[in-house]
Amino acid sequence: MTTTRDIVADQRDQYAFHDEIVYLKESGRGLSRETVEEISRFKDEPDWMREFRLRAYDHFVQRPIPAWTEGLDRIDFDRIVYYRKPSEREEKSWDDVPEQIKATFERLGIPEAERKFLAGVGAQYDSEVVYHSVREELAKIGVVFMGTDQGLKEHPEIFRQYFGTIVPPEDNKFAALNSAVWSGGSFVYVPKGVEVPLPLQAYFRINGENTGQFERTLIVVDEGAKVHYIEGCTAPIYATDSLHAAVVEVVALPGSKVRYTTIQNWSNDVYNLVTKRAHAYEDSVVEWVDANTGSRRTYKYPSIYLRGERARAEIISVAVGGKGQHQDTGAKAIHLAPNTTSRIVSKSVSKDGGRTSYRGQIRVAPGSTGVTASVRCDALMLDDISRSDTYPYIDIQEDDTTMTHEATVGKISADQVFYLMSRGLTENEAQNLIIQGFLEVFTKELPMEYAIEFNRLVKMEMEGSLG
Amino acid sequence: MTTASPRAGRARTRRGPADLPFSFADRGLAEALAAEREEPDWLRADRVAAIERSEALALETNPLYTGYLDLRAADLSTARPYVRTASAGSSGEAGVGTSDRLPDGLSALIELREDTIPTLAIAPEAAAAGVVVESFGAALRRDPDGLRAAIEGGAGLPDDKLAQLVRGVWSQGVRVVVPDGVRLERPIVVRWAAGEPGRALVTRTSVRLGREAAAAVVEEIIPSGPGGIAPDAPQSLVAGTFEAAVGPGAALEVASIQELGPTAIVLQQRAAGIGDGGSLRWALAQLGGRIVRARNDNRLEGDRSSVEQVEIVFGAGEQLVDLTTYTRHLGRDTTGNVLSKGALRDRARMYLKGMAIIDRSAIGTDSFLGEYGMNLSKGARSVAIPSLEIDQPDCRRAAHSSSVGPIDETQVFYLESRGIPDDEARKFIVLGYLEPVVARVPWAPAEERLRALLSARWDEGRPAAEAA
């Protein structure tokens, strides 16, 4: 590769910091039944939640590491701190947030974002929600947006009805782990017919070497309601392995619309295993917009179970895999009701020996007549030491399904680079522009400042390999 | 899903989907076969090594596919393998291969019926050119070193439980050799008549084309019994390999039509290595059998080598057709084009698993994988898993596509507007959908026969009222 002018300033420092926090409560390393009970006791939870956690713990211990992929056996579960709480109570206003934590968020730009147009901020600092605000008008129309722990206490009836029903602990080993030790995350409830006018935003961070982050998010959108939830992730860079095992449950009741947007930039030592699943009832629309950059390994397949007639699913998934990274991502649409539709678009970029894998599933159960489903996967490989895989599963058990799947893998076209360079761009600029164009199907779905941030993250990922 | 068929009066142990439905394929059988045939030590050792390897492997070693296999409907616990060897000779020997038994338009014909070889005939000009069509038994007598070079170590066979099992306990083998520079105008037909209730036939086929050679092989797998087999007859096993070595600049066409009876369990392994500038075209049709599990391995080893594979399934009843294709690109500027299509009636199931692998060495690859399903009944199920694993981005094309859909109503409408009745229109559309394989069968009588079989398969499924 030729040397060209570097157009991307190194912005890693901005995202790679580690504050000295005095942890008020910390579970110690390793996981045992006692740790699980202790977490529940710390949090002063009802009996049913403690039992839920223990049931999950038992399952976690019994369940083998999944055999369908490699690398997971490298996670050392005994080295991980399963619970730590940086501040004693949930903060209601920005002024009450401890200075040091506030400084961290300022570097991430949260207050500005909030001032601009975000409706609410639930910022997760390590394992607990420390800062949280809901705009007055949202509270007035009955929208609940709070930490998941707080949701359990304040809205026990909605919480218990749905918690753990979309992703039961027995679903997979890492859902079981999360169910046993979950802490933090967001709880959202949007009442019947309410349209939340602005996106709800939660900013997640991992801080602390070897801290496991096990947030649990539950979003319940009642009939005819509408909401857009955004999460973004940055994390400090550390040498030893960190683990992020989250569970996100979304319930889209009849006629509702939910969009869940994620921009992830875990540091390159994080194992990121997330179970994201939504149940979509009659005439509802669920959209996952999901970007994965960073992390050492990501295993994430946002899924939508189309349970009600005419429900619609859209999943846009983007992954960028660089040196030492494996982005194993994809999407699932499970059609369980007639006349449901799904669309999956996946884009991935691999470089510097990184690997991206698309793993997805389309399933049409017997009785789900009139289903339409489509999948489109495109992968770009920037060099020949990288790797790209596509593993789609298509299982159709009806006679009138219309399903299409297409996938292509290739490199950046030399013609396109040449054309742009003939217009005065450097090779690096040309390649960045082509990559941004390739990923535009995703970025165009983002609110503006997220799109800017995402393009910046992609450029950061690209620097060093280009030019 | 049922776990065991409620066959009265017979206690069956519960088997998992990936458990073999028979237990006869062991070292003892491998040794017995070697002894019966007075085989040389290398072959006996090869059988034993293979059966040990087979025993060590799981039925499905690719974790991508472990959820999609199911041999539970097979019950071969009492099936008996053939041990006695067939005594047919080589096309080069006196007494066999009389050309008057050779149908017009063929270079050679070998017919194998269970453990016998009723016909072996080769055209004089082919024989004169050095073309060999013979049984493994004859090859062992005539050209032991040549056979050894072709089959020892299972050279082209994948490290797969069933492939190694066949290598260990085959009882019959067919060898085809087309020497360097020999280009056969007319096809070679290899006809297997198999599926006798309660029996297990395990076979190998080895086809080698020398440099710049060209040939077409039509493999017909037909029922051995007269008329239909009662649905409650004991099941039979028909297991075999097809091992192809395509030399530099050579061109091989293979058509295989499998139309066994409804109680046959069919296990097929096809493996091909293709040299520089060589080409291989597969046209494969799966019609019969209760369970079919077939795996194709295409290795594009030579630069500019190419493989084109089209495969069709027309499933009905309770059939399960489970097809896997691996296409591995190793040389530069290779081309792989794999197309699988299935139409399913009744409660038939089809698993299409395809994998295109582009190695780092495979610069300039063009690889396409297409898997298409058409469910004609509510109870049918089609699964497609078209996968890509790519280590070299400098390719002409690396893509796959898949679709599942019903019969296109606009096409039905168009045909009806031309005066074609509804059922006839639908039949045309389905047969047209499967035509790409039919049209590639390189022998007119086999092509016509396949067309008739597909047509009959459609007619069987018509509702009685309409059929009347």
Image (spheres, helix red, strand yellow):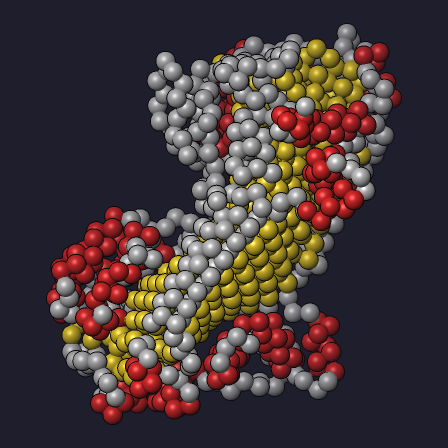
> In front: B380, or B26?
B380
Tell me what residue is drawn at x 71 percent, y 16 percent: B111
Instruction: Residue A165: name its quadrant.
Output: bottom left
Give the side of residue B429 with respect to residue B352, left or right.
Answer: right
Whether residue A368 is situated above or below residue B181 in the rendered picture: below
Residue at the (77%, 29%) spot, across then down: B447
Residue at 58% x, 74% y: name it. A440
Q: Residue at x 64, y 49 (%)?
A: B369
Instruction: Identify the image quadrant of the N terminus of chain B.
Output: top left
> Based on the displayed image, in which of its 4 quarters is residue B19 positioned?
top left
Establish if A345 lies above or below B442: below
Q: Is residue B217 visible?
A: no
Camera-side residue: B460 or A100? B460
Q: Position of residue A118 (x, y in %)?
A: 40, 84
Q: Nearer the viewer, residue B362 or B18?
A: B18
Image label count: 0
- Closer-to-camera residue (A404/B302): A404
Query: Where residue A270 sits in the image (x, y, percent)?
Result: 36, 68
> x, y percentage for residue A319?
50, 67
State the quadrant of the C terminus of chain B: top right
In this picture, is B100 found above or below B372? Answer: above
Q: x, y percentage for residue A155?
A: 22, 70
Which picture quadrant has residue B451? top right
Q: Residue furthest right?
A: B125
Question: In the drawing, does residue A275 fall left or right of residue A41?
Answer: right
Q: Is residue A52 visible?
A: yes
